[in-house]
């Protein structure tokens, strides 16, 4: 009987601890609601966009970022509206995203994200070599995503950084993980 009593007392203590934790969470939720910040909008971006749009019909969007990697930094902040989206030419959108429709090119961009690299470093990271590597580099240079710092050394441009970061973030959010990402081999 004594063993059951100690178990009951332990359960009561755990219930009391959980009740206190629940009250603390309720307070945090209340503070977040008052401040306009939510778990779904931790930086307050959606709230700011709603205020910006006000009572007008339409949509307002922002893409922004700040990255500090390997001694360089990149930051941007761009606001645009629903009519910007509907007015931009489909060919212009295609021109922006077409280079990303090839996983070898995306791998190449990722290899260059942290720093400029030589051909041998790019080959080591991506497995691309020779004509295949130069073909993809040429396409990325033509698109304005990559530049040649000096003979045989390549670097991402700010455009390349932004496109890679935003496209990768969207893929992480909107696409299911690939078999490779979850460790399933064919």
Image: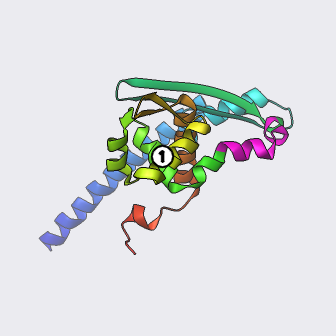
Q: Nearer the viewer, residue 90 or 1?
A: 90
Q: Residue at x 41, y 61 (%)?
A: 181
Residue 163 image point, x, y percent? 58, 39
Viewed as shown, does residue 16 lie left or right of 135?
Answer: left
Is residue 56 placed above or below 103 in the rendered structure? above
On screen, residue 5 versus residue 170, left or right, reads: left
Q: Is residue 94 magenta?
A: yes
Residue shown at 48%/61% (left/top)?
177
Q: Position of residue 19 (x, y in %)?
A: 39, 50
Quadrant including the N terminus: bottom left
Question: How many numbered discs, if any?
Answer: 1
User: For residue 32, what is the image quadrant?
Assistant: top right
Find residue 114 and report its image quarter: top left
In which quadrant will I find the C terminus? bottom left
In the image, 79 versus 167, the foreground residue is: 167
Residue carrying label 1: 134
Residue pushed farthest left? 2
Residue 178 position within the rendered picture, expressed as x and y whole percent measured from the top left: 47, 64
Main SS category, magenta section: helix
Q: Name the residue located 35 percent from the left edge and 24 percent from the top edge.
A: 71
Residue 94 in percent (x, y) is at 71, 47
Q: Which of the pair 135/178 is nearer the observer?
A: 135
- Badge 1, how many Cα within 10 Å: few under 14, some, many 20+? few
Please, what secondary structure does the residue beneath circle 1 have?
Answer: helix
Quarter occupied by residue 158: top right
In magenta segment, residue 67: no
Q: Which residues are magenta?
A: 84-96
């Amino acid at each position: 009987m004594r063993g059951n009593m100690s178990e009951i007392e332990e359960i009561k203590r755990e219930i009391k601890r959980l009740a206190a934790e629940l009250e603390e969470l309720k307070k945090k939720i209340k503070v977040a609601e008052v401040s306009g910040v939510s778990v779904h909008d931790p930086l307050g971006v959606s709230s700011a966009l709603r205020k910006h749009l006000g009572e007008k019909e339409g949509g307002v969007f922002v893409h922004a970022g700040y990255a500090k990697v390997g001694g360089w930094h990149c930051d941007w902040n761009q606001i645009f509206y629903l009519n910007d989206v509907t007015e931009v030419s489909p060919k212009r959108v295609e021109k922006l995203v077409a280079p990303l429709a090839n996983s070898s090119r995306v791998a190449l961009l990722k290899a260059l994200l942290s720093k400029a690299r030589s051909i041998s470093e790019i080959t080591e990271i991506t497995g691309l070599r020779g004509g295949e590597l130069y073909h993809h580099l040429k396409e990325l240079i033509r698109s304005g995503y990559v530049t040649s710092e000096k003979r045989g050394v390549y670097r991402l441009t700010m455009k390349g950084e932004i496109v890679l970061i935003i496209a990768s973030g969207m893929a992480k959010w909107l696409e299911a993980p690939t078999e490779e990402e979850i460790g399933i081999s064919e």
